[in-house]
Structures are given as structure tokens and as C-alpha cells.
Image: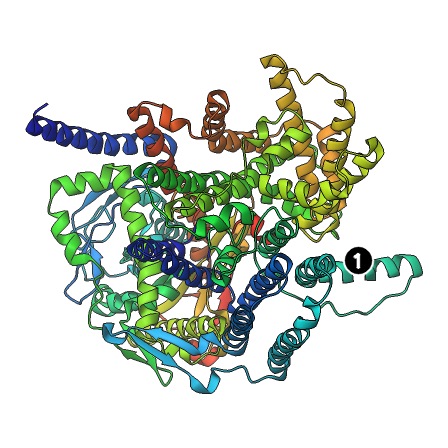
Amino acid sequence: MSFNSIAFEVFFVIVFVFYWSLRRSYRLQNLLLLAASYVFYGWWDVRFLVLIALSSVVAYCCALSIDRGQMTGKQRARASGFCILAVMLFLGLKWNAVKFSLPKWRPLLTVDWNNLVYADAQHYILTLGIIAAIVLINISYPFLCRLRDNHRRKFFLVFSITINLTVLGIFKYCNFFVDTFRTLVHSIAGISVNTETLNIIMPIGISFYTFQTMGYVIDVYRRTSQANDSLLDIALFTTFFPLVLSGPIERGTTLLPQFQKPRAIKSCDLREGIWLIIWGLYKKMVVADNLAKIVNTTFAPFDNPASALAVPQDGIRLLAAIYAFAFQIYCDFSGYTDIARGVAQLLGFNVRLNFNLPYFARNPSDFWRRWHISLSSWLRDYLYIPLGGSRYGLCKTARNMMVTFLLCGLWHGAAWTFVLWGVFQGILVTLHHTLTRNSDGETPRWWVSAIQCAFMFHLSCAGWVLFRARNLNTVGVFSQSILLHPSLSTEATSCFGKLVFYCWFLVLFQAIQGLTGTLNPLSRLPWFIRLNVWLFVIMSVLSLAESGGKEFVYFAF
Amino acid sequence: MRLTTWIWQRIAKTLFVAAYCLLAAEVFLRVFAPQSILPRYVRPTDYGIRGNEPNCSYWHVTPDYRINIRTNSKGIRADSEIPYEKPPGLKRIVVLGDSFGMGYGVDIQDTFTSQMQKALEKNGIRCEVVNLSVSGHGNAEELITLREEGFRYEPDLVLLAWHGSDLDDNIRADLFGLEDGRLVRRGKTYLPATKLQEVLFRSKIYRFVGEHLHLYTLVRDKAANLVKYKILPTIRILSNPASSAQSPNESDATEVVLEYQRHLTIAILEEIRQQCISHGANFLILDIPFWRSRTEHISKFPWEEFAEDRHFTVFCPVESFKQHNGKILYWERSDGHFTPLGCRIVGEGLAKIILESGLLSEEILDNDTDGGEVLTAD
């Protein structure tokens, strides 16, 4: 279910009404949110709810075992029961055998009993395998708990990380590794390896929720957070529907406490939540989706690696497409985050900021403090700092940065262009770190800042070419065309015209955000100007939005 | 401040804000997103479907064009009256279709039917076009129009402007259905929102709003699309789960519905052809392609089902369009109907096919015997 679909609008209205009608019991609210989150995620594919349920249980059990030394029998029974129930419900049943209908306006639920249960060997083996694993873990658990404290803590941390990374590896990177292996063997030994690619479907949001649960377990291991006793809370933490598909990647220390207390909503929260949703829809449906047309039209001829196309002679058009992609990717992802934050706010939760005017960054380090903050801070806290951070001299700092950004690139997608994009970002950050090591950190004059911002924007645009290109040939063609044939054409003028038309308000609003130093400058403006801004944004969404509700780009990551 | 004063102030402010919002929204649309204002004046006919309002004159205004639509006393888009009796020596072509057939997007002298008539007259054929197209019609309504009205004009040729939207329209109208592969009449009438429109159209204010306000057009179109493409299909599926229950998964269910759509369409077209034969008229289908880009035009005609039982003469202008690659054949910024150039290509193509196939000759071509043909004007 996508935030920009009618199905979500109906779903959210229903959840919102029921949620606040249960405000006397936050536990019931949590239960409702969990059910709603499973419906939200299962709308796409019910089977993958098993993964998310297993991820929750692994995080719950490992965190408790690390923190408390041992789970109680009740906790183990609850976790095992939850797992078995999830496997039975989401892997054992065919949900499309259950149909809801309204013949003569009378609600009717029909079940095709003959087709309700998966009857193939594959499903039996998978279901029985998972159940057997649960039984095995339960049998071996008392022995594991007898390990020395330090060893036990490490064992459960490694177990949790291994499970998460294995799931991620199988579902996200398996095809990539098989293809790379095949190409490598063919190019080195000249042997054609006939390995069947498994054609594995990647579950939406898998990178987000696995990182979120891993972060929670690592926090418990580091004793910065306590293990949570409630399986319901952990399951909700993993599946919370505003965040499950594309983040922000929340921390247990900030989100879990919010599940454990009653929520209230003030009128200002309501207003801000609605504003965030509308502003997010504006970014996604008006800016990103419309710019996507320019981007796709320009990049599409080069997407097929087999097509050997001549270098276009109007480099300015390609430059316009890169600028368009810079705004498209930003508005697509930050728009989603804004909607997620707005939806969470309407439910009484505070979700962390994920984008803080990234194109106003003055240098690569600043850019990563503003772009996808939840991921960059995750990588900083759980990868870069454990690797040694900047503590052991320049060489090791550079190594740590490169490793971190290489994995950051790989996190974004299973393709070499993403790896290269990560390497490119790593080089930029390392160079910046090396060059500014001894600087006094004084704030430059405004015009120097402006030049730095413009320069940094173009550096990030260079990175976006790697990010968008489906093959390395495209990068070469774009570079050649822009640098060697920077001539203007009518198409280029038209592209720039559209770019300005769709982006001018966004840039103006962000300039105001930057100058006033607040992400919500509306509250400081007189009511009449506020009214006009709301009107402009709502009318833009209604009239300029691309029809059809396009999917969010970051769903692919 | 006294309470009553405070209340009055609040009411005044609310009213001001509401009025201001409407005004500002209208200004926004005119500046940033001008709408295609295409009022459609239809009314119920005696035979239970929609027909154009007679003696009407109104404007279609879009970012691409501004044209005047005029209808005669029978609701035909024409500047003159057309009697039922056919003058001797004159060939008559009855045109059935939707907004494309009616010539939305171009002045009356530029419609493809006018272009076709001109091209035929250049070749020495005295002919008259009776355009019975009504915006929104599908093939089911076209069949009824032909039976009830079209044959009264004693046509020599019936030209049906077929568009991909007809597949869906035929289902939505529910005027005909298929039972054991046979075409059967279902609903007696199909008058979506016509009663409401009739009431509203009586008001001059409503007509003014409908013909001039961009905000009204936006809201109406959004609401109509929501009802047409989201709510009604959902209700249809919920109230008749049989179609989807027959199939194990959703994509198969969709394929079942699409296959039914195509078979129903072919059955209606076949019925039209049979009716034409019995009334001594030839039958020609114009397949109007969908526009993807200036170089890509796609036919949605159910060719597979057509191939099973080729009785029709179909003219598809995709090949002719290819010769004009890069030129604007459809209005791109507004409603996607033909431009004058698009109409000219289609009109001339049709004329060529009619001449070459002898569709205006005295002989009735019964393609049952010689197999149907797919024709291009090249």
C-alpha cells in the first residue's frame, strides 16, 4: 500500500478513527497499530509478513537474552507461538481464497475451503523447516544460556546480526552475487557458467526494517538501551506502518518508549501532521513524479547496455536531466519521509528527521549530515565508529570512511553503479576530511557559502549520474556529452522550463527554511500568508500531480 | 468583547476565508494549471440512452484550443438541418462514435468526417455525412442509436469510430451482455447522471460555472474519475465476486474480464454489421489509435477475437500516422483528441478506403463470403 494511493487514504482514515477511539488504553492502541501495520505491509504480499514477524522475534529474543541473561518460559512460549502463528497464517494459507463481497449491499465473507491451504511440497517443506528450527532453538536455548556472560551476549548479538544479514543477503543480493560470479568466471576463464538465477522477489522495505532491528539489538548489547519485555512492542517497532517501507530507520531508544506510554494529540500537532503529509505529497506527486518524465525520457535510450547510441550533441539537455534527477530523488524520498512523519504525528508519535535541506550543504560531510540522516547516523554509529572512526590516524580514518560508504552504496541497491556511487561519496568525504583537518571551522561569508553550496550541489549531481545510470556506458556518454558538447537545443530549453516550473516553489520554500533556520517557517508567518501557502500546495497536488500514483523510488532499496 | 460580536466576527472571517479560497484556487488554476473546459450537454433520448442536446451552442476551451460546438434540432453537430429523407443521387454516411467521432478538439469544418466528405466530393461522389456521435457513447449505445435513429437517414454506409475506451464503456453501460456466446439485451436504459444534469442544466448559473470556471471543472473531473475508475469498479467486484472467484489469482481475474470485454465488443460490432446488411448499408470501422508519443500510436482493437471471425472492414490509421512522425496529431496538453492535422490524415485515409473498397457503391459487401479486411490507406 503506497502513501499516494486511494487505498491508503481509506485505510488511514479507518485506522485514525479507531485508534483515537481507543485512547483510554495505549496497549489496545498498540494492538490496533500492529494489526494495521500487518494489513498495510501484507497488502503488497502476505507471504513476506513471515520475514518481518521472524525479524521481530529474533530481535525480541536476542535482546532479552543479551540483557537479562535468559528469557522466561512465558516469554519463550510467547515468541515461539507468535512465530508459529505467523508461519501458519502467512505461509500456510492462501489469502486470496478468502473473498469479501457485498451482494445486494449485504457484507458476505466467502472462503474457498478447497483452496485455502497451500498444498505444494515447497510450502510444506518451508513451513515445517521453520517450525523445526523454532523447536530446535527452544531445545538448545537452555544450553546457550549457560555460556559465560560475555560469550552469551556476543553469541546472541552475532546470531541476530547473522540472521538479519542472511535474510538481506538472500532476498536482496543473491541475484547480484550470482550474476557477478557468472560474469567474473566468464571474463577470467572464458567459461559460461549456467547457473539459474533464483528470481527472488525482494520484499519492500527489507533494508529498512532489518537495519532498525539490528540497531535495537546492538544498542541493548552496548547497554545504551534496555531490552523490551513486550513482544507486542517489538513487533510494532519493526512493523510500524508509517516507517516500515522506507524509514526513517528509527532507534529503539527513541521509538520504543513512545509505545509504552499514552499518546495525546494537540491541535498544533494535528496541523503540523497534516501539513507534513500535504507537503510530502507535493514533493512526491508534483515535483518528483513530473520530473521523472524528463529523467526517464532522457535516460531510457541508454538503459539498455546492448544499445550503442551516439553521444548526444546537446549536452545541456542531459545536464537538465541530471538536475531533474537530483530534485526527483530528493523529493521522492524526502516526500515519503515527510508523509511518514506526518502520519506518525497524527497518531501521536515523534519520528526523527531524515532530510535537513541537503542541497544547502556546503561540503560532503555536511551533505551526509543532511541527507538520509537516519541511515548515515546508523552507519556512523554501528559501522564507522566500531571500525575505529577517526581515532587511529589519517589512513585508517580514510579506510573506515571508504568501507562505510562502500556499504552505504551497496545498501542502496544490488548493482555495481551503486557500489561506485558509494565509492565516489567515500572519496569526496575522505578528501574533504583530509583537506579540512586543520581548518579553524570559522563560518564563511554568505557569498562564499553560496558558492560552496552550488559547488557541492554539482558534486552530488555527478554522484546522481552513477546512481541513476543502469550501466557504466551511460556515465561515459553523459560525461562526454556535457563536457564536450555543451550546446543548447529546443528540448533542453523545454526541460529547463519544466524544471523551473515544478521546482521554483520548493526552492523558494527551502530558501525560507534555510534563512529562518527552521524547518517549519509557516508557524512564524502571518495567517494570511500561511493560508496562501496551504492553498498553493493543496491546489498543486490536486491539479499538477501526475495521475496514476507512481511508486516511491526508495521502495526498491 | 461581547460574545455575539465575537461570534459574528468569526462567521465573517470564515466566510471571507471560504470566498477567498475559492477565488484564489480559481486564479491558481488559470495561471499554473489551466483545465480543459469541455462541457457536455446531453439529455435522455426516447430510446433510453444519452443524446446531444438539440439547438445548442457552447465553447470548448483548453490550453490548446478554443472551439465552438453547435448542434441542430436533432442534436447532431452540424450547422444545418438534415432531413430523414435522402435526396435522390446523394450518398449518405451515418457516423457513430464518441467524442472522437463528434470531432472534439477541432472546428466543424476540420473534423475527420468533414475532411472525409471533402475528399470524397473531390473524387466526384456527392455525399452527406450524418454524424450521430455523442461524447461518452460506447458501442452498445451506438448500436441502439443506429437502430433507433441512424437507419431513418437511409445510409449507404455506416462508419463507426471505434476507440479503446469502448471496451470498458460496453461493460459499464450493461445494455448488452453475452450468454453462451450470444449477444443478449440486458439493461433497458443507460443514463448515467443524466437526470441530475438535466436539472442542473436548467440553471443559467450552473451553465456559466460549467463553461467558465476551472475550479469547478477540476473538482467535477476528479470526482467523476474517482467514481468511474475507483468506486464503481470496486462496487462491481464486491457485488459480483463470481468473476474474480472463478480465477485463482487477481491477474487471471483481470484477464477473464478483459477477454469478456473483447468478446462482447466483437459481438456488438457483429450485430451492427448484421443490421447494416439488412438495411442495405455497408459497414466500416475506424480504429482510433491511442496516443503514447508523437512517434508511438497504439491500436487497442480486439484483433485476436477479430481474427477468429473476420467479417469487418477496419481502417486503422497507425501506418498513416507513422509517415507524419514527430508532428502533433493529438492535442497533447489537453484532452488528447485529434488536431486538425490528425483529422485530415484520418479523413483522407477513410475516403481512400471507401473509394478503393467501393463502400459507397450499390453493392453490399457481405464479408461473410470473402473474409474481412484490415485496411490501411497507404
Q: Residue B256's spot in the image, x, y percent?
A: 44, 75
Q: Chain of mark 1?
A: A
Determine the residue positioned at 77% across, 29% down. A431
Q: How crowded is the residue under tag 1: few (<14 C-alpha within 10 Å), some, or many (20+)?
A: some
Is residue B67 visible from the viewing direction of this image? Answer: yes
Q: Is residue B45 above or below residue A454?
A: below
Q: Is residue A419 above or below residue A355?
A: below
Q: Position of residue B180 (x, y in %)?
A: 36, 86
**Left or right, B190 with reference to A194:** left
* Residue, far right: A189
In the figure, residue B234 lies in which quadrant? bottom left
Q: Nearer the viewer, residue A221 or B361?
A: A221
Circle 1 SS class: helix
Q: Residue at x 75, y 49 (%)?
A: A416
Q: Which residue is mark 1?
A: A180
Horizontal and vertical percent position of residue B8 = 10, 29
Q: Amino acid at mark 1?
A: Thr
Question: Along the line of sight, which residue is nearer the eye, B83 or A70?
Answer: A70
Tell me which residue sits at (61%, 36%) in the image: A321
Q: Is residue A71 above or below residue A293?
A: below
| Front residue of this view, candidates B115 and B102 | B102
State the colouring used for the structure image.
rainbow
Q: Can residue A247 be seen from the camera position used here?
A: no
In the rendered view, does A225 fall on the left or right side of B235? right
Quarter occupied by residue A6: bottom left
Q: Is residue B53 rendered to the left or right of residue A82?
A: left
Q: Is residue A516 above or below residue B246?
A: above
Q: Residue A255 at x, y = what percent?
A: 50, 48
Instruction: Say how many tags the image has.
Output: 1
